[in-house]
Image: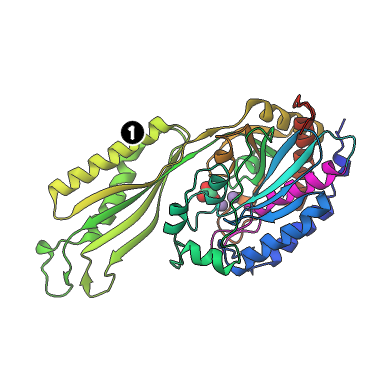
Amino acid sequence: MPDHHSHVDGARVLADLHALRAIGAYKTGVHKPTFSEPHIRSLHWLTERLPEAGLTAEIDGIGNVLGTSSKPGPKLLAGSHLESQNYAGWLDGPLGVIYALEAARVINADPAAPGAIEVAAWCDEEGHFGSFLGSRSYIGGVTEADIDAARDRTGGRAMRDALREAGLAGRTRAVCERGRHIGYLEAHIEQGQTLEDSGLKIGVVTSIVGIWQYRITFTGEQNHAGTTRMADRKDAGLALARFCVAIDDRFPAHCGPRTVWTNGRIALDPGAPSIIPGSAEMLFQIRDDDPAVIARLEGLLRSMAVEVSAHGPCTVGVECIRTGAPAIMDASFQSAIEAASTAVACGKSIRMPSGAGHDAQVLATVMPAAMLFVPSIGGISHHWTENTEEADIVTGAEVYVDACRRLLRGSGHDGSR
Ligand code: GLV
Ligand code: MN
Ligand code: MN
């Protein structure tokens, strides 16, 4: 038997998602980088909705929106993020926030439901200014010096200026009260093709990848593109291109079954048609859910840099600029999502790892955390064409709210808070 899923208002969930999509719309997606005007407008939009769910809303000093409840009993923290990648999709982030809002609207008003859902929209999950700054701040992992140093990766705007312009300067940053929550539940679009290919509706996330990022720099010699003989050149751009190809040749023999690697940005200096680049830089990312695999690949990357430098004519440096531990999702939370899928979605679920990073991996360091996925059409994400069938969005909301009820009921909490 479905467990209260009739209380989910699918039309309301879709209307809310479309309302957020209209803020900062770009083609069929959105352009809502962190602390852009449409991002801030989305945060305020959410704070205006949270009281409907019996929650007291605040935007804290790093741009997290938090809705807190005074209802007695166990509390489940629920949410995701509202900013987007540049010119990207409408569901990456907002889906999880609106599911959390819907769960809070349905459960917090129900006197028969034990406890409450508290809602969070974490700031900057998409890493415009750092990595998981909002959720890491909430668990006490971001210093004032980190904020002083943070710059927007696209335009270079200082985070302090962005916070001031958003009216958030000087506000207190919310910090997690240990023991307040029985755990954290985040819903998200899958951003891959596993669910679509298998005709399933719900992904029960088992683990979230770790993300390691490197700045790889190449140093040669800037010179004239017309007068410098080919044999005499120290072309840093060419060295970079060769290095990319070498990575693709050599990594497969050392990687794990799910390892992925990406050259996200390449820059040549000076980057002009008539000048041999004297230096070049690439941002390189490795993802895996096994830290040992990452360590092995980082070792290989560094040894390749040493080899290339020894051979010449350019030198190569590898600097690690981001590390992130993989996270295992809580076993009993996974069972609750699976039970909800059985009750509400004919058991059309599958356990699967997440290749994308999510705030749940940060929250998992301080409380039980779990995630559920809904299908992505064609597996496309981080692009404005990202989409999910509306029927799948509604099914996901029903499973999510049912899982929330199960978790609150099964928490064994004494109800004293
Ligand atoms: C999050 O959006 C990621 O890049 O995995
Ligand atoms: Mn996301
Ligand atoms: Mn994303």
Q: Position of residue 289 (x, y in %)?
A: 48, 34
Q: Look at the picture and state if 147 lies above or below 373.
A: below
In screen coordinates, is 317 left or right of 176? left
Viewer-closest of 227 and 20: 20
Q: How is the image coloured?
A: rainbow
Q: Residue at (59%, 66%) from the top-left corner?
A: 166
Q: Is residue 307 above or below residue 390?
A: above
Near-viewer residue (11 or 164): 164
Please give the range of residues in magenta. Answer: 82-109
**Residue for badge 1:** 296
Q: Nearer the viewer, residue 369 or 396?
A: 369
Q: Position of residue 69 (x, y in %)?
A: 77, 44
Does the magenta segment cover residue 368? no
**Picture coordinates of residue 344 (x, y %)?**
81, 35
Residue 320 visible here: yes
User: Residue 235 versus residue 139: which sits nearer the camera?
Assistant: 139
Q: Is residue 99 magenta?
A: yes
Label 1 sits on a secondary structure element that is: helix
The C terminus sits in image quarter: top right
Residue located at (61% from left, 66% from top)? 167
